[in-house]
Amino acid sequence: MIPRRILPFIQSALKRQAAVALIGPRQVGKTTLALAMGNDLPSLYLDLESPGDRQKLAEPVLFLRRYEDRLVILDEIHRVPELFQSLRGIIDQGRNRGRRVGRFLLLGSASIELLRQSGESLAGRIAYVDMGPFDAGRDS
């Protein structure tokens, strides 16, 4: 994997907020970067384009409670927009148990709809990191 200069920004955001949304156009390396981060710490990766992974979240509070001690990476979050409301409760419950930051890394294409959905449900609980296409001359 080619090192990305955006990595420290994501890591910093995870140290400040319970959820971080890594947003950007398709095919810029969001998933590759998230999987590399997941290799370096305890994590769970769910691809929400996969019917099997979506099924695991049929009861998101019950399922995700088992992974409170890990970074949960939710790829293609826009495929399950109703999940944002559940994440709010999960984050708040975790805060009450001392698990305040670094809970969720949400991946999705940059869209106003994604920002609107997550912003309404996760206000004060989420940070946004924009990832652009790979460019050797840019901080990508």
Image: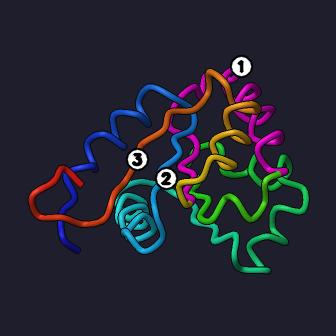
The residue singled out by tag 3 in the image is 130
Count neighbours of disc 2 (C-alpha within 10 A) and say few if under 14, some if 14 to 19, many if 20 or more.
Answer: many
Q: Is residue 53 left or right of residue 98?
A: right
Q: Earlier in the sequence, mark 2 or mark 3?
A: 2
- Residue range corresponding to the magenta coloring: 82-108
- SS assignment at label 2: strand
Q: Earlier in the sequence, mark 3 or mark 1?
A: 1
Residue 41 or residue 8, whichever sits in front: 8
Give x and y (percent) for residue 61.
84, 46
The residue singled out by tag 2 in the image is 23
* Image quadrant in which the N terminus is located: bottom left
Residue 57: quadrant of the picture: bottom right
Query: Mark 1 belongs to which amino acid?
Result: Asn
Q: Earlier in the sequence, mark 2 or mark 1?
A: 2
Decide: is 64 above or below 75: above
* Residue at (90% x, 56% y) in the render: 59
Give x and y (percent) for residue 111.
59, 53
